Image (tube, rainbow, N blue to C red):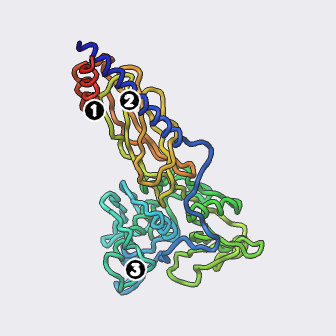
Amino acid sequence: MFKKILGIFICLFFITTGFSTIEISATTQEKLIENEICKINTYTPGEILLSTTWHEKFIYASKTPINYSLPPSDPNRHYRLGCWSAAIGQIINYHELQSNGSVYYVCTEIVNETGDPVIIDNNLDVTKYFWSNMPKTIDETSPPEEIDNVTTILYDTATVIQKDFGTGKYKTIQTLSDWSQLIKELRDHFECISFETMMVDKPPITDIIDEIDNFRPCMLLLRENVTNPWHHAVVIDGYDWFGREFWVHANYGWGDTAYNNWYYYNGSFPEYGNTTFRKLLFIRLKPRVADKPIGPELGEPGLNYTYYTKTTAPHEPLLYYNWDWGDGTSSGWLGRYESGEICEASHIWKEKGSYKIRVKAKDINGFESDWSESLSVKIPRNKINKDIFVFSFMDRFPNVILILRRLFMSQ
């Protein structure tokens, strides 16, 4: 009699889970990425992306080392952050990228109060930025929390790219043709900066348009003239067309001044009139690492198990997820999901064993996150424990008891 009942249970189980599997497969199929890419927001020419007009000096540099040769009353007593720091720092703030890790280096020329070389030892892990306290501008009358947040993110940026305070140099830049070390430090110490971040020499206008269209302000390095080696870094945070001329909006990093304005890209910029020198830093972003998968950690071969994860990305673009099931197979890219929306995926392991499943995310521009932390799943046997199976089945489908009772009572 037990075998007869068990047989009926098994038939009903496969009928029920069969419908469930078909439904899951249909849902998964709808989520599979084909070739279509969809964007939520679109950039409007003439729009300015940055809301900040920060400076590389004065109160903005209040966390940099002190120049003890100047009196305490001098507003420039703290060494300036540098134009690269001000430009990249405003881009980091725009994307709301948290810092991490630590930075250690020795400044080349400046000394501290005792005459020893100044050592930069900055623990970025102790800092949490509060994005609501990042105003357009600060001065001595600003709330302390705003001053602290702005000066901290600018100082952190300066130390990440290793500003050699007291000089016009950065230890991560040996030559203007090689920015690889600077880019590596940015990737290592700010979340979401992808391997696709790069320096481009004299890029076509279409590349700049693509960056701004995807809400990615970029840093433009200008040169004063052909004979003078002085350079200045600004943020390109908008573009527009005036007739057939391509114009860009430049944030000079000199505070809220008239220098922050629209300029013909192929023409002269104020103070930096070399029209042939154009080097741009394209800071590309990737989604944050997805949460460690959640789901069953013990199972049986041939059964379907569902797992869950989620993540976010700067500016909340649409996301896709790819699951590595640890058995040589993957889900392929599933999507599209809103930033922060839970992604679920199901898998059947055919053989017993131990598997590590992990997941990564990709945004609508194709930039991929790192792999998530793995979840270990054990599939120890392929023999069904009939008692556990019956009770778990009865718990999941209590109405079956009524069906069986009527079935046997009718005999």
Q: Is residue 50 visible?
A: yes
**Secondary-structure class at tag 1:** helix
Rendering quarter of residue 152:
bottom left
CA gap, disc 3 to disc 1? 72 Å
Kindly identify which numbered label has been placed on residue 237.
Answer: none
Q: What residue type is labelled 3?
A: Ile
Where residue 402 sits: x, y (%)?
25, 29
**Residue nearer the viewer, 69 or 403:** 403
**Residue nearer the viewer, 236 or 70:** 236
Kindly identify which numbered label has been placed on residue 399.
Answer: 1
- N-terminal of the pair, mark 3 or mark 2, is 2
Vertical comparison of 124 with 54: above or below: above
Residue, far right = 244
- N-terminal of the pair, mark 3 or mark 1, is 3
Characterize the local packing of mark 1: few (<14), some (14-19) or many (20 or more) Cα atoms within 10 angstroms: few
CA gap, disc 2 to disc 1? 12 Å
- Residue wearing tag 2: 16
Q: Which amino acid does label 1 sit on?
A: Asn
**Secondary-structure class at tag 2:** helix
Q: Which amino acid does label 2 sit on?
A: Thr
Rendering quarter of residue 24:
top left
Q: Name the quadrant of the C terminus.
A: top left
> Of circles 2 and 1, which is in front?
1
Where residue 52 sits: x, y (%)?
48, 75
Characterize the local packing of mark 2: few (<14), some (14-19) or many (20 or more) Cα atoms within 10 angstroms: few
Q: Is residue 226 visible?
A: no
Where residue 328 sits: x, y (%)?
47, 27
Vertical comparison of 14 with 335: above or below: above
Kindly identify which numbered label has been placed on residue 59.
Answer: 3
Q: Name the quadrant of the N terminus.
A: top left
